[in-house]
């Protein structure tokens, strides 16, 4: 089985936000929640870079470690998923996450946290693959159909890569060698405790 | 004419193309620079600020934080340090009480019951006490569930049942925080008069509060131990309430680091609070004969008052002019 990862080549990202839009549309993500976002660092200054970021599906995921009801699980493809039936909306995964991935719909008392929502790597949830319940709770399950996450699939500059960690790292290394520069795999050190030296 | 025009256009075109081809390599050659020379670097940014923040074009501005790895330290606190602190505080306190009960036993009324009583807490005081106490017990159980439920209770009752219970516990924890906070504020206002530490408490503390042997150090309406409980409730309750609301209303007051800090304060104060309240419950029930009545019926035996709150009893008798009897006779000893 593969070890699925995301890699954003910041030297290619043009901040078009198409990944953000594609994600929202594919999964019909509720209003106010963005599973993916593009952050521009040093905006307007020389050397600015944009990075598309979502749940990184960390190795030894902090969200899963701190969850009081243990609602997270890791798939055979190393994708970190959770059960919305078990989630109690306490907010702890959000305190632990380095990437600000978990988000909560403002429902219920005091507009407080509902069931947590985050990027599923287009892999749905614990329900049967491709079922209506799965779609309503977690969005489309593209992985079960043999497809990769839509954000990366339709990235116009192929900045955002998704797939097996070794393969996308290899693609990135080749790019860096060919063009002679690269600002590194953003978030990898934090998520996977490893980085791609460029 | 037409062919001449076509020739001129062709000539211009060829000239333009030639210029373009000749001009193109020049700027390319001059541009031998590394386009990433001034670009932002993740490692450097993380070293500078411990987190990376930028600008987003979606409405949710909180998502502009790209990476903030300090959640790792918070995770370590929650999964390791807090369990040790909570475990030692609560199990330690229980152990101390069990040992104390087995060696010392219940603190008896040494002069027996007089049969006469004196009002210690009026109806309103008791209502506030029990409102706060009921809320506290539910808040404590639902709070401990968040820290200790996963390793202790989840394996016993399974995922589905544990999630269901935790969901209701979370609602209870959120809702009951309001009456609890009101209770803490009322306790603060209601009993502040008798709870300012003074020299009597020093003497009381020096004599171990009369916990050992048959000593009965003099005390006012509230003795040193009760004053300690009062301040634990007021300060501890204030802290858990303030930090709890920070967590309950995310981003109203602080960003994520602030919420991590709030959770750390909330949980440490919470477990110590629970440990302190175990001691309070013990001494108010099976730990001391005649103590529960103070918060039960609100009236305590005069002999109990004489043994444990001698100065208060003197003061009360002086105020009412005669002995604080209810129905009995002033001179009737209980022996």
Image (spheres, coloured by chain):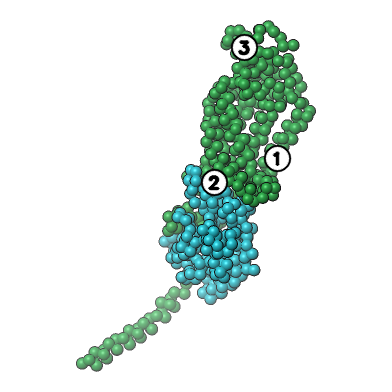
**Residue B110 percent coordinates (x, y):** 74, 17
- The chain carrying label 1 is B
Instruction: Tell me the crowding category of disc 2: few under 14, some 14 to 19, or many 20 or more residues within 10 angstroms, Cα based.
Output: many
- Badges 2 and 3: C-beta atoms under 8 Å apart? no
Q: Name the residue under label 2.
A: B259
| Above or below, comparing residue A145 to residue B120 in the picture | below
Q: Which residue is drawn at 69% across and 49% down?
A: B155
Instruction: Give the drawing colour for chain A.
Output: cyan
Locate the C terminus of chain B by quadrant.
top right
Say whether mark 3 and mark 2 are on the same chain. Answer: yes
Mark 2 or 1 closer to N-term? 1
Can residue B290 be seen at all in this image of the molecule? yes
Q: Residue at x 33, y 87 (%)?
A: B14
Mark 2 or 3 closer to N-term? 2
Marks 1/3: CA distance? 46 Å
**Residue B194 percent coordinates (x, y):** 58, 21
- The chain carrying label 2 is B
Q: Mark 3 points at which residue?
A: B326
Report the residue that reaches farthest toward the right.
Answer: B103
Marks 2/1: CA distance? 25 Å
Instruction: Tell me the crowding category of disc 3: few under 14, some 14 to 19, or many 20 or more residues within 10 angstroms, Cα based.
Output: few
Locate the N terminus of chain B by quadrant.
bottom left
Q: Residue at x 64, y 64 (%)?
A: A76
Q: The green chain is which one?
A: B
Mark 1 or 3 closer to N-term? 1
Q: Name the residue under label 1.
A: B88
Quadrant of residue B176 in the image? top right
């Amino acid at each position: 089985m593969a070890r699925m990862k995301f890699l954003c080549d910041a030297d290619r990202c043009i901040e078009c936000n198409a990944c953000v839009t594609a994600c929202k549309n594919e999964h019909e993500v509720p209003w106010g929640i963005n599973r993916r976002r593009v952050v521009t660092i040093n905006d307007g200054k020389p050397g600015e870079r944009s990075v598309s970021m979502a749940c990184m599906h960390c190795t030894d995921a902090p969200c899963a470690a701190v969850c009081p009801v243990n609602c997270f699980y890791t798939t055979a493809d190393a994708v970190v998923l959770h059960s919305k039936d078990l989630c109690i909306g306490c907010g702890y995964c959000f305190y632990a996450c380095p990437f600000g991935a978990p988000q909560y719909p403002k429902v219920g008392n005091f507009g407080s946290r509902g069931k947590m929502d985050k990027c599923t790597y287009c892999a749905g949830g614990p329900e049967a693959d491709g079922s209506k319940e799965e779609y309503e709770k977690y969005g489309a399950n593209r992985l079960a159909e043999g497809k990769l996450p839509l954000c990366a699939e339709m990235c116009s500059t192929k900045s955002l890569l998704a797939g097996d960690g070794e393969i996308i790292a290899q693609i990135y290394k080749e790019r860096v060698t060919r063009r002679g520069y690269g600002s590194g795999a953003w978030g990898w050190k934090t998520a996977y405790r490893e980085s791609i030296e460029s | 004419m037409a062919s001449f025009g076509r020739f001129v256009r062709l000539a211009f075109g060829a000239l333009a193309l030639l210029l373009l081809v000749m001009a193109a390599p020049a700027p390319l050659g001059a541009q031998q620079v590394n386009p990433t020379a001034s670009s932002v670097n993740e490692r450097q940014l993380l070293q500078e600020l411990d987190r990376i923040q930028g600008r987003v074009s979606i409405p949710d501005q909180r998502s502009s934080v790209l990476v903030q790895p300090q959640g790792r330290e918070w995770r370590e606190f929650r999964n390791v340090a807090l369990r040790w602190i909570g475990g030692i505080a609560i199990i330690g306190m229980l152990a101390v009480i069990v040992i104390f009960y087995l060696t010392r036993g219940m603190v008896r009324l040494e002069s027996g019951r007089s049969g006469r009583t004196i009002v210690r807490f009026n109806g309103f005081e008791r209502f506030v006490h029990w409102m706060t106490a009921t809320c506290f017990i539910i808040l404590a159980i639902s709070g401990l569930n968040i820290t200790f439920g996963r390793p202790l209770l989840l394996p016993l009752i399974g995922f589905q049942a544990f999630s269901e219970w935790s969901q209701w516990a979370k609602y209870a924890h959120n809702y009951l925080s309001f009456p609890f906070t009101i209770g803490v504020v009322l306790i603060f206002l209601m009993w502040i008069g008798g709870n300012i530490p003074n020299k009597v408490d020093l003497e009381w503390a020096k004599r171990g509060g009369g916990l050992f042997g048959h000593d009965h150090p003099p005390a006012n309406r509230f003795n040193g131990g009760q004053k300690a409980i009062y301040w634990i409730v007021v300060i501890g309750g204030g802290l858990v309430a303030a930090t709890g609301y920070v967590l309950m209303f995310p981003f109203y007051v602080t960003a994520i680091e602030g919420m991590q800090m709030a959770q750390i304060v909330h949980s440490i104060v919470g477990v110590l609070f629970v440990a302190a309240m175990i001691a309070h419950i013990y001494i108010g029930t099976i730990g001391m004969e005649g103590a529960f009545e103070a918060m039960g019926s609100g009236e305590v035996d005069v002999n109990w008052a004489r043994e444990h709150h001698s100065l208060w009893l003197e003061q009360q008798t002086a105020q009412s002019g005669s002995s604080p009897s209810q129905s009995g006779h002033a001179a009737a000893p209980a022996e």
